[in-house]
Image (cartoon, helix red, strand yellow):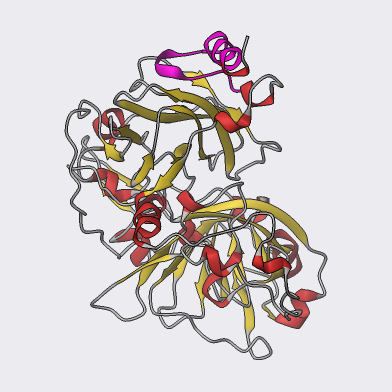
C-alpha cells in the first residue's frame, strides 16, 4: 500500500468532528508525511509573487554560500525578507499623537510579542523622557510621601511575569452591523504578550505605609495627556508591579519607558505608561476614561462601569481573513486564546459553523493571564466552510457567540468585545469574516474604526 494511501486512512481514522477536523495529536504521529500539509498564503503575498519574474535558482549552489556574510551588528534587526511583518498604524486624523497601532497577530507564531511589534495606544504622542530626570511620587493616604528615581527602583528586588495586555477597545469593530474585513491582527491586534520585569507595587506601598481609609490608587502618566486611572487597593497590593524591562531589555519608549504600571489581566488602559505618580485615595478619580469612556449603557438601563478584567477570548489567526487556501488538503488551524481571570483550560474549534467541535492542542506551558497558542489539523475538502474557535478559562467561563453577547450587552457596545470570530472559506479558498447566520453573504468594504480607544 502506498504512503499516500496510508496517510488517507490515518486522516480518516483520526477525524474527531464534522467537516474534516482531526485529532489534535495527529501531527505527532509518525505515519503522517508532513509534505502533505497544503499551502496557505495571504492574498497580498500571492499578488506580490505573481507580479515578480521568477529568477532561476540552483538549490545545490545558492549564491549566499559563495561569499562571506555580513559583519556583526550592535543590535539585531529582522530579515529584509520579513519586511511585511509590521505594526499597522491607525492614527487619529484630527488629534496629532492620538491613535493606535496593531500587532500583526496573523503573521506571528508562538505567544511572545517582540518589543517592536507590541501594540500601541497613545493619547498625545510618545514622550521622550530622560530617565535620569524622571521621578515617581507616591503620596496621598500614606504615612510617608516618597519620591523614587529610576536608579532607586533599579536597586529593588524584581519579579518577572509573562502576561498579555489588551486594550478594552480591542476587536470593537465586532459591534458593527457588518463584519469588518481587515486581516485578523488589524482589528483584533490590540493585544500583545511579553515578559515584564520590575518591582512589586506592594513593596513600595508597604514602604510608604497605607492609612486605614486607603481604598484606591490613582496612577498618572508623564505624557502630555497626563493619563489618570483608578485601581482598587486590593489589586495594587495583589499582583500589580512597576515594570522596567520588557522581554529582557529596557521598555521601549512607545511602551512606557522608563517605567510602566502592569496590572495583569485587567484592561490595557490601567497599565499606565510613563508612570510618574501614584496617589492613594479613598475613592476613584472619575477621570475621562472612567466616565465618558469605559461606561456603557446596558439594555436593562443600568451602566457597566469599572469592568476591569478582560474576559476569555480566542481568535484563529490562520487561516484568517485575506488568506488563501491554494488547494484541497491538510492544513493547520492555529490561533491564540487568553483570559484576564486566569489560565485557559481548553479551546474548541469548529469547521462547520459550530455544528460540531473538536478540542485543540494547547502549546505548553499554559500560563496565567497570558496568550496561549492552540493548534489543530484540518482536512479541507474544497467546499465552503466556516471555522471558529471557542475558549474556556479555568473559572469555567466560556467565550460567547456574537448573538449572545449582543443580547446581554445591547447593540451599542464599544468595549470588551470578546465574541467568537467566524472565518468563511469559499470554494476558491479565499477567507473572509462573517457573522452568525451570514454564511452566504459577506461584506468586503472596510468599516471605519474609531481611533479614540483607551
* Nearest to the observer: residue 250 or residue 309: 250
Q: Is 403 left, or right, of 220 in this rendering?
A: left
Q: Position of residue 182 (x, y in %)?
A: 31, 52
Q: Quadrant of the N terminus?
A: top right
* Nearest to the observer: residue 327 or residue 101: 327
Q: Is 249 left, or right, of 95 in this rendering?
A: right
Compared with 90, 149 (above or below) is: below
Quarter of the rendering containing residue 356 = top left
Compared with 36, 263 (above or below) is: below
Q: Position of residue 236 (x, y in %)?
A: 62, 56
Instruction: Specify whether residue 69 is painted magenta.
Output: no
Q: Position of residue 446 (x, y in %)?
A: 21, 54
Quarter of the rendering containing residue 249 = bottom right
Magenta stretch: dominant secondary structure = helix
Whether residue 394 is visible to the viewer of this picture, yes or no, is no
Q: Is 92 left, or right, of 38 in this rendering?
A: left
Q: Quadrant of the C terminus?
A: bottom left
* Residue under the image location 35 percent in, 74 percent down: 98
Q: Position of residue 336 (x, y in %)?
A: 52, 41
Quarter of the rendering containing residue 399 = top left
Compared with 33, 172 (above or below) is: below
Whether residue 360 is visible to the viewer of this picture, yes or no, is yes
* Residue under the image location 61 percent in, 74 percent down: 139
* Nearest to the observer: residue 28 or residue 336: 28
Q: Which region is colored magenta?
A: 5-24
Amino acid at each position: 500500500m502506498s504512503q499516500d494511501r496510508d496517510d488517507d486512512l490515518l486522516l480518516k481514522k483520526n477525524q474527531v468532528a464534522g467537516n474534516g477536523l482531526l485529532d489534535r495529536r495527529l501531527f505527532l504521529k509518525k505515519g503522517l508525511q508532513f509534505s502533505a500539509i497544503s499551502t496557505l498564503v495571504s492574498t497580498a503575498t500571492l499578488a506580490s509573487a505573481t507580479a515578480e519574474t521568477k529568477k532561476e535558482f540552483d538549490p545545490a549552489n545558492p549564491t549566499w554560500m559563495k561569499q562571506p556574510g555580513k559583519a556583526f551588528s550592535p543590535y539585531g534587526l529582522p530579515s529584509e525578507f520579513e519586511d511585511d511583518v509590521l505594526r499597522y498604524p491607525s492614527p487619529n486624523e484630527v488629534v496629532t499623537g492620538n491613535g493606535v497601532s496593531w500587532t500583526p497577530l496573523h503573521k506571528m507564531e508562538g505567544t511572545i510579542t517582540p518589543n517592536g511589534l507590541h501594540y500601541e495606544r497613545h493619547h498625545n504622542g510618545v514622550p521622550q523622557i530622560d530617565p535620569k530626570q524622571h521621578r515617581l511620587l507616591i503620596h496621598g493616604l500614606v504615612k510617608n510621601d516618597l519620591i523614587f528615581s529610576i536608579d532607586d527602583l533599579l536597586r529593588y528586588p524584581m519579579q518577572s511575569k509573562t502576561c498579555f495586555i489588551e486594550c478594552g477597545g480591542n476587536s470593537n469593530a465586532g459591534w458593527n452591523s457588518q463584519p469588518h474585513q481587515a486581516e485578523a491582527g488589524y482589528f483584533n491586534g490590540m493585544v500583545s504578550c511579553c515578559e515584564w520585569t520590575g518591582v512589586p507595587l506592594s513593596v513600595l506601598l508597604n514602604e510608604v505605609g497605607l492609612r486605614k481609609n486607603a481604598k484606591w490608587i490613582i496612577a498618572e502618566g508623564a505624557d502630555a495627556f497626563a493619563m489618570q486611572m483608578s485601581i482598587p487597593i486590593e489589586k495594587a497590593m495583589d499582583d500589580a508591579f512597576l515594570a522596567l524591562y520588557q522581554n529582557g531589555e529596557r521598555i521601549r519608549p512607545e511602551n512606557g519607558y522608563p517605567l510602566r504600571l502592569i496590572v495583569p489581566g485587567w484592561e490595557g488602559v490601567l497599565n499606565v505608561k510613563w508612570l510618574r505618580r501614584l496617589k492613594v485615595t479613598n475613592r476613584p478619580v472619575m477621570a475621562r476614561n472612567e466616565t465618558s469612556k469605559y461606561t456603557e449603557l446596558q439594555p436593562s438601563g443600568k451602566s457597566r462601569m469599572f469592568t476591569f478584567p478582560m474576559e476569555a477570548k480566542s481568535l484563529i489567526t490562520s487561516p484568517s481573513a485575506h488568506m488563501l487556501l491554494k488547494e484541497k488538503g491538510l492544513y493547520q488551524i492555529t490561533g491564540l486564546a487568553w483570559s484576564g481571570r486566569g489560565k485557559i483550560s481548553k479551546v474548541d474549534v469548529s469547521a462547520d459553523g459550530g455544528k460540531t467541535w473538536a478540542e485543540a492542542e494547547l502549546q505548553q506551558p499554559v500560563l496565567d493571564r497570558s496568550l496561549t497558542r492552540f493548534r489543530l489539523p484540518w482536512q479541507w475538502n474544497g467546499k465552503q466552510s466556516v471555522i471558529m474557535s471557542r475558549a474556556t478559562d479555568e473559572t469555567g467561563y466560556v467565550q460567547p457567540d456574537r448573538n449572545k453577547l449582543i443580547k446581554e450587552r445591547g447593540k451599542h457596545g464599544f468595549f470588551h468585545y470578546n465574541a467568537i470570530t467566524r472565518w468563511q472559506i469559499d470554494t476558491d479558498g479565499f477567507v473572509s469574516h462573517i457573522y452568525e447566520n451570514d454564511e452566504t453573504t459577506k461584506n468586503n468594504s472596510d468599516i471605519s474604526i474609531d481611533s479614540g480607544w483607551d
